[in-house]
Image (cartoon, helix red, strand yellow):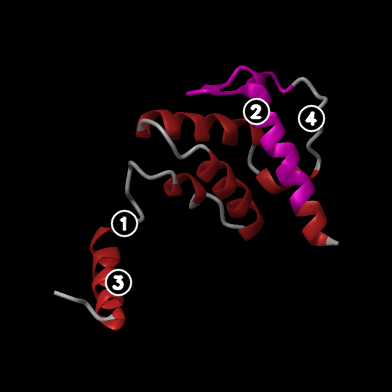
Amino acid sequence: MRTSVSGLADRLDRLYEAYNREDAAADPVQIVRRYTTPADQEVVGFCAAALAFGRVASVLNSVETVTRAMGPDPAAYLRAFDPQAPHPELRAMVHRWIRGADIVALLWLLRQMVGHCAR
């Protein structure tokens, strides 16, 4: 049976409504929603997306570790991020094959992207 594009869109919308829950405990987006400013949400969302592979518990733990390191204002943390600083909490991280130095590099690249877009 062939489904029309609009029929498919309707079906996908129904599935989205049925399964999209703000309180989904197994979804890293719950961490993003803790932040109220769009800039903070974008930084945390980018980090969550970059780490969203592997076991759910591991993903959540890694995203929580990054957000603890960034503190209550992730966007400000990112704007001032210095990859040469010690960052012991980040450098000690391991997420599957990703190491702390990779997280530092990710944040450095994100800082450059955000800075470039702000110009």
Q: Disc 1 or 4, which lies upstream in sequence?
A: 1
- In space, the residues marked 3 and 4 are separated at their CA atoms by 42 Å
Q: Disc 4 or 2, which lies upstream in sequence?
A: 4
Q: Amino acid at mark 3?
A: Asp
Q: Which residues are magenta?
A: 87-113
- Local packing at callout 1 (Cα closer than 10 Å; few below 14, some 14-19, many 20+) is few
User: In the rendered view, would you say 20 is above or below 84?
Assistant: below
At mark 3, the secondary structure is helix
Identify the residue under disc 1: 21
> Could you say which is closer to the camera, residue 77 or residue 83?
83
Q: Amino acid at mark 2?
A: Asp
Picture residue at 66% right of the left edge, 56% below the top: 39
Identify the residue under disc 3: 13
Pointer 4 with pointer 2, Cβ within 8 A: no
Picture residue at 28% right of the left edge, 69% below the top: 12
Identify the residue under disc 4: 83
Pointer 1 with pointer 3, Cβ within 8 A: no
> Could you say which is closer to the camera, residue 53 or residue 30?
53
- In space, the residues marked 4 and 2 are separated at their CA atoms by 11 Å
Picture residue at 50% right of the left edge, 30% below the top: 62
Q: Disc 1 or 3, which lies upstream in sequence?
A: 3
- In space, the residues marked 1 and 3 are separated at their CA atoms by 14 Å
- Is residue 109 found inside the magenta-colored segment of the image? yes
Q: Nearer the viewer, mark 1 or mark 2?
A: 2
Q: Tell me the quarter of the image containing the C terminus.
A: bottom right
Quadrant of residue 7 in the image? Answer: bottom left
Identify the residue under disc 2: 102
Q: Disc 2 or 3, which lies upstream in sequence?
A: 3
Q: Which mark is residue 60?
A: none
Picture residue at 29% right of the left edge, 71% below the top: 13
Q: Nearer the viewer, mark 4 or mark 2?
A: 2
